[in-house]
Amino acid sequence: MISKQYVSQVRLRADDIESFDRYPFCLPTVRHLDVLELHPKVTFVVGENGSGKSTLLEAIAVSFGFNPEGGSKNFGFNTRASHSTLHQYIRLSKGIRRPRDGFFLRAESFFNLATEIEELDKGPGGPSIINSYGKKSLHEQSHGESFWSLVMHRFGGKGFYILDEPEAALSPQRQLALLSRIHELANDDSQFVISTHSPILMAYPDAYVYQCSDTGIQRIRYEDTEHFQVMHDFVVNPKRMLDILLGAKDA
């Protein structure tokens, strides 16, 4: 049966990899990857820093046709070629429908994207690109405000959106608002693949949550993620956690 979602699977072409001893194939997330089933609406990839989740998202994005440093398929800027070759060794299973919209958001290179928009708008002809981002320079807003302008104005629905740590510049309240925006877009035939450390975002109902660890990548329940458990334990009893962390005598 042909899937109607934009991307249903991510498959590692393991037979084409000469050695799993070199980066990025030495990462447990990649080494043990076989087939990653994506949810029709929202899929989360979580894990510790350095676990390989951003490397995996980057590969999915580049394989789909997005610029490695972020943006839509129409962006081709290259500040520094730092992306891995993993995209050459994965295969995306695409459905019969093509998304009308799409975007790859990288928190770490969003500044470069904002600069590229300004540079392109200096050129002659055509409407200003910044009009699609709220009509105000992204550099003239705080990091969080510029993120929010992107999500609210540029994301138009019926799209395939890959977000790498979108909570990086957002307050808890804005993370809740982003959760609502994701739901709105998901109900408008959009599909998301998101890497995050935010227990707020990964609480999205019925989403697939994949955890990257030393043993590879596996799907788990939201409540079983370390992110949820650590945050839960801290919020329920912050004094006890602080006593343990700071080495109080009565811990």
Image (tube, helix red, strand yellow):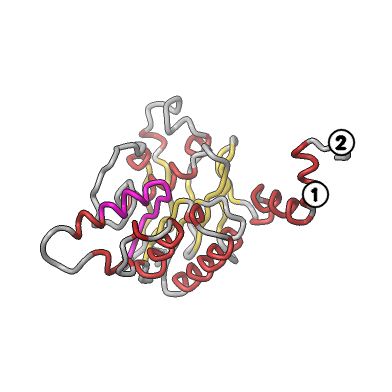
Residue bounds of the magenta highlight? 101-116
Horizontal arrangement in the rendering, residue 214 relative to residue 143 (left or right): right
Q: Is residue 35 magenta?
A: no
Q: Would you say residue 136 is visible in this rendering?
A: yes
182 or 217: nearer the eye?
182
Q: Return the x and y of residue 68 as percentages of the image width and height.
A: 32, 46
- For the C terminus, give its image quadrant: top right
Residue at (48, 67) in percent of width and height? 182
116 is higher (above) or lower (below) than 41? above
Q: Return the x and y of residue 250 as percentages of the image width and height.
A: 88, 39
Q: Which residue is mark 1?
A: 239
Q: Residue furthest right?
A: 250
Q: Earlier in the sequence, mark 2 or mark 1?
A: 1
Label 2–label 1 contact, CB within 8 A: no
198 is higher (above) or lower (below) than 20? below
Horizontal arrangement in the rendering, residue 135 relative to residue 45 (left or right): left
For badge 1, the amino acid type reads Lys
For badge 2, the amino acid type reads Lys
Horizontal arrangement in the rendering, residue 223 relative to residue 193 (left or right): right
Q: Which mark is residue 140?
A: none
- For the N terminus, give its image quadrant: bottom left
Rendering quarter of residue 145: bottom left
- Dot 1: few (<14), some (14–19), or many (≥20) neighbours within 10 Å? few
Q: Secondary structure at mark 1?
A: helix
Q: Secondary structure at mark 2?
A: loop
Q: Return the x and y of residue 174 as percentages of the image width and height.
A: 53, 64
- Provide the major secondary structure of the magenta segment: helix
Label 2, label 1: how far apart the Cα atoms are:
13 Å
Residue at (34, 51) in percent of width and height? 70
Q: Return the x and y of residue 108 as percentages of the image width and height.
A: 41, 46
Q: Which residue is mark 2?
A: 249
